[in-house]
Image: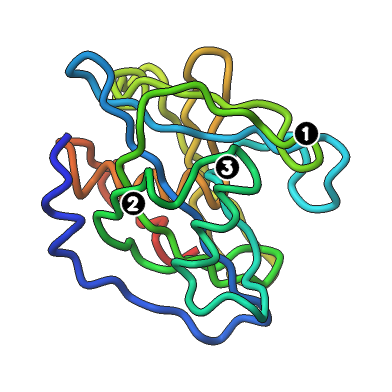
Amino acid sequence: MTLDPVAAYEPTPIDDQRHDAAVLTPVIDRGGDHYLLFTKRADHLGEHPGQMSFPGGGVEPTDGSTLETALREANEEIGLEPGEVEVIGRLDDIRTVTEYAVTPYVARVPDRVYEPDEREVAEVAVLPLSGLLDPENYEYERRDHPYYGDIVVHYFHVDGYTVWGATGRILVQLLELTTPFEAPLGVDGSEY
């Protein structure tokens, strides 16, 4: 994984959704291998309970930018201090079925134990890049969405976890920019 393409990337913003949100896509270097940090959302949450996600959430009026949102939320959800974060760059904004425009920030973070805030996060999962890149762990399907039309849903099954939905779309773009991963020919999940 090389993060240089993320630093040089010019992301596409989205400004036509009802809500704005931001996530941090944390990359961990562990013994020369790369890992990505995910959170498993608490089962009692109203939106996307139990799903795998990157740390993040909705923009608050006190946030000066979407980056501040991502850093604040990562601190609240898993105890990641903003001073520990080396932000590399941004990926394209994505739309969610809950009418959010989500801005993903890619960052290097320390390899340490993170404590989930049980009000929002059931578990922190650090998944190996090698598992995310294994073709045996990846699948996709096309769905007909009532608002967006024909969409692609990506699934990554690693270490007993399934990453999919908006997080899967963010992950696909990150992997395509930083590794040899390519979504199957004709699959473009970046729009939905």
Q: Which residue: 54% across, 24% down?
A: 125
Q: Nearer the viewer, residue 62 or 131?
A: 62
Q: Say which of marks 2 and 3 sits in front.
A: 2
Q: Which mark is residue 106?
A: 2
From this view, report whether residue 11 is shown above or below residue 43: below
Counting residues from the N terminus, which is met first, the one under dot 2 or under dot 3? 3
Rendered-image quadrant of the N terminus: top left
Between the C-alphas of marks 1 and 3, the distance is: 15 Å
Q: Amino acid at mark 3?
A: Ser
Q: Which mark is residue 118?
A: 1
Residue identified by numbered label 3: 53
Between the C-alphas of marks 2 and 1, the distance is: 24 Å
Q: Give x and y (percent) for residue 82.
A: 44, 52
Q: Amino acid at mark 1?
A: Glu
Q: Secondary structure at mark 3?
A: strand
Within-10-Å neighbours for mark 1: few <14, some 14–19, many 20+: few
Q: Nearer the viewer, residue 98 or 87?
A: 87
Q: Which residue: 64% across, 43% down?
A: 77
